[in-house]
């Protein structure tokens, strides 16, 4: 397993200092863990002395990095005297790669969401400050959304519109043109325009070119 994990023979692995096959950060992490967890247990049998799941990066003989979890404990003889250390390393490279992929995906998703938020804010600024009458309707012609320009131009509050049908704003003589425009837009899946008269709250009519 040593030959597979590190790319060296068992004989070389037995004599190779950790500086030759671990990254500098991993060397420092192991030294700190040994000093804090294993060394105190050498002179004191009552101290268990163990390192559990310390993440390190091993440099394979061919240069690529392998992520692993090291666990170690003090090895004692029958009298309880410390005679060495015993440890193991578990390869977690595939897991780390999967975690990195998840983080990259999460970062991309966050970037996309931020772009969407910016786009929505730009759209909001445009729709809230335009004098064009922009709205969303359901298939029955009921208002789902209306820009503030409806109140500015027609003097009709958005709260009133959201309980109304679009057809109630249109001159009766233009109802057929409105329906045909909507039907064609739905059928051809592309924009259609018509000239319609909209009723102002004061009763007079204003002519608009309408796209659906």
Image: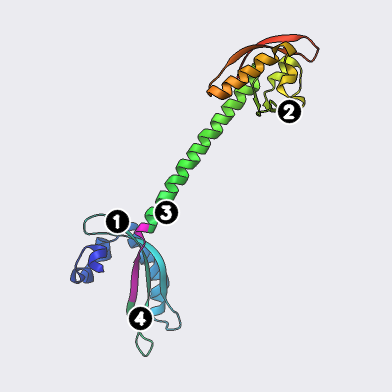
User: How far separated are the C-alphas under marks 4 and 1?
Assistant: 29 Å
User: How far separated are the C-alphas under marks 1 and 3?
Assistant: 16 Å
Most frequent secondary structure within the magenta stretch: strand
User: How far separated are the C-alphas under marks 4 and 3?
Assistant: 34 Å
Residue 130 visible in image: no
Q: Which mark is residue 1?
A: none
Give the residue number, with chain letter if any, for mark 4. Answer: 75
Q: Position of residue 129 (x, y in %)?
A: 64, 20
Give the residue number, with chain letter if any, for mark 2. Answer: 162
- Residue in the image at 44% along x and 48% along y: 103
Question: Disc 4 or disc 1, which is closer to the eye?
Answer: 1
Q: Which residues are magenta?
A: 86-94
Give the residue number, with chain letter if any, for mark 1. Answer: 65
- Residue in the image at 39% along x and 81% along y: 43
Which quarter of the rendering shows the N terminus? Answer: bottom left
Give the residue number, with chain letter if any, for mark 3. Answer: 99
Mark 4 or mark 2: which comes first in sequence? 4
């Amino acid at each position: 397993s040593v030959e597979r994990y590190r790319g060296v023979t068992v004989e070389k692995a037995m004599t190779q200092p950790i500086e030759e096959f671990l990254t500098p950060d991993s060397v420092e992490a192991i030294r700190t863990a040994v000093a804090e967890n294993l060394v105190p247990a050498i002179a004191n049998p009552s101290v268990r002395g163990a390192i559990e799941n310390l993440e390190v990066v091993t440099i394979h003989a061919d240069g690529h990095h392998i992520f692993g979890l090291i666990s170690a404990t003090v090895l004692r003889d029958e009298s309880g005297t410390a005679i060495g250390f015993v440890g193991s390393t578990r390869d977690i490279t595939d897991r780390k790669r999967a975690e990195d992929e998840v983080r990259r995906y999460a970062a991309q998703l966050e970037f996309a969401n931020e772009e969407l938020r910016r786009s929505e804010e730009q759209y909001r600024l445009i729709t809230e400050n335009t004098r064009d009458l922009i709205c969303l309707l359901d298939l029955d012609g009921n208002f789902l959304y209306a820009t503030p320009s409806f109140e500015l131009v027609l003097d009709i509050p958005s709260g009133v519109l959201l309980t109304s049908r679009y057809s109630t704003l249109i001159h009766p003589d233009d109802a057929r043109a409105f329906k045909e425009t909507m039907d064609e837009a739905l059928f051809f899946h592309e924009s259609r325009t018509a000239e319609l008269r909209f009723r102002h709250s004061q009763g007079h009519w204003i002519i608009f070119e309408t796209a659906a």
